[in-house]
Image: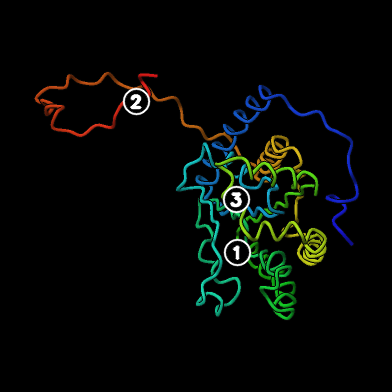
Amino acid sequence: MTDKSETQNKKPAVKKITNYKYEAELARLQIELVKLQEWIKVKGLKVVVIFEGRDAAGKGGTIKRITEPLNSRACRVVALPAPTEREKTQWYFQRYVAHLPSEGEMVILDRSWYNRGGVERVMGFCTDEEHQDFLRSCPEFERMLVRSGILLIKYWFSVSDEEQERRFQKRLTTPTKRWKLSPMDLESRKLWVEYSKAKDIMFAHTDIKQAPWYVVNSDIKKHARLNCITHLLDQIPYEDTTPEPIVLEARPPQQGYVRPPMNDQTFVAEIHDKV
């Protein structure tokens, strides 16, 4: 069985949102994200948001739009590198536990413990026994997190084979995106069906009532970002706790200070004011 949302059920062409409408709606949603952040802080909530999906599915861009207006102390993004030799000897979930939120925090996992259900499984980085143990343990681990008071929200970004290939090709000619084409990404192009099968197995075991998977259709990046942010805001009932407007008093006269000579300081060259 392959991922029908990615390979079989091809939807008719969708009219893309205009840049003007996209920017306006994104700005509105980002204001709501700030309100949500304050609510999480005031109520002492602990929130974990997992972003998973294929390479080039648009996870990173969505995460950037979510975190852009937020305080990085209250909303942390965790994107762990490959495990060290020491970490490989630990309980599989151990290195992720260290990054779980305290009260008043939201943690976004840019890929997560689901590496074992996806890339590790497909690329042979784990044994069949380790994979089977993950499928048995992961639902219990997540239920334990939920029982501890953590709100766990899981997103899978679904992109079609054709759109993923288009994005890979674009990365080849875009200097700021070329770094995204790792040897692992190039290998994944050859293993589309294997990744689909691994995802189906993973969903069958981990799409649980306490922490269901939410699939985001990400063939159109701007739609995916707005849809995902809107859904995220709907998952946490919040109220507007924005403080009352602050009135700044007039500053008192600044006396008794003489600025050192400007020649005593090293300034950055003002190149762009001459353009």
Q: Mark 3 points at which residue?
A: 180
Residue 35 shows in the view: yes
Q: In this view, does 4 lie above or below 23?
A: below
Which residue corresponds to the image point at 67% horizontal and 45% vertical from the top-left?
A: 58
Quarter of the figure with the N terminus: bottom right
The residue that appears at 79% across and 58% down in the rendered structure is: 192
**Element type at marker 2?**
loop
Three-letter amino acid code at the position of disc 3? Lys
Q: Quadrant of the C terminus?
A: top left
Along the viewing direction, whichever of 105 and 15 lies nearer the viewer: 15
Front position in the image: 145 or 92: 92
Q: Which residue in the protein does label 1 denote? A: 148
Residue 239 position, x and y percent, is 59, 37
Q: In this view, does 4 lie to the left or right of 29?
A: right
Tell me the kind of residue under disc 2.
Ile
- Residue at image mark 2: 271
Q: Where is residue 249 in the image (x, y as percent from the top left)?
A: 30, 21
> Do the residues under discs 3 and 1 have CB atoms within 8 angstroms?
no
Q: Distance between the residues labelled 2 and 3?
A: 31 Å
Residue that appears at 54% across and 37% down: 34
Name the secondary structure under disc 1: loop
From what the image shows, is residue 96 above or below residue 157?
below
Whichever of labels 2 and 3 marks the residue nearer the N terminus, that label is 3
Tell me which numbered mark, 1 or 2, is placed earlier along the sequence: 1
Quick check: can you spot residue 208? no
Colour convention of the picture: rainbow
Task: Decide: is 97 above or below 12.
Answer: below
CA separation in Å, label 3 and label 1: 36 Å
Name which residue type carries label 1.
Ser
In depth, the one of 187 and 199 nearer the eye is 187
Relative to 239, is 272 above or below? above
Mark 3 vs 1, N-terminal side: 1
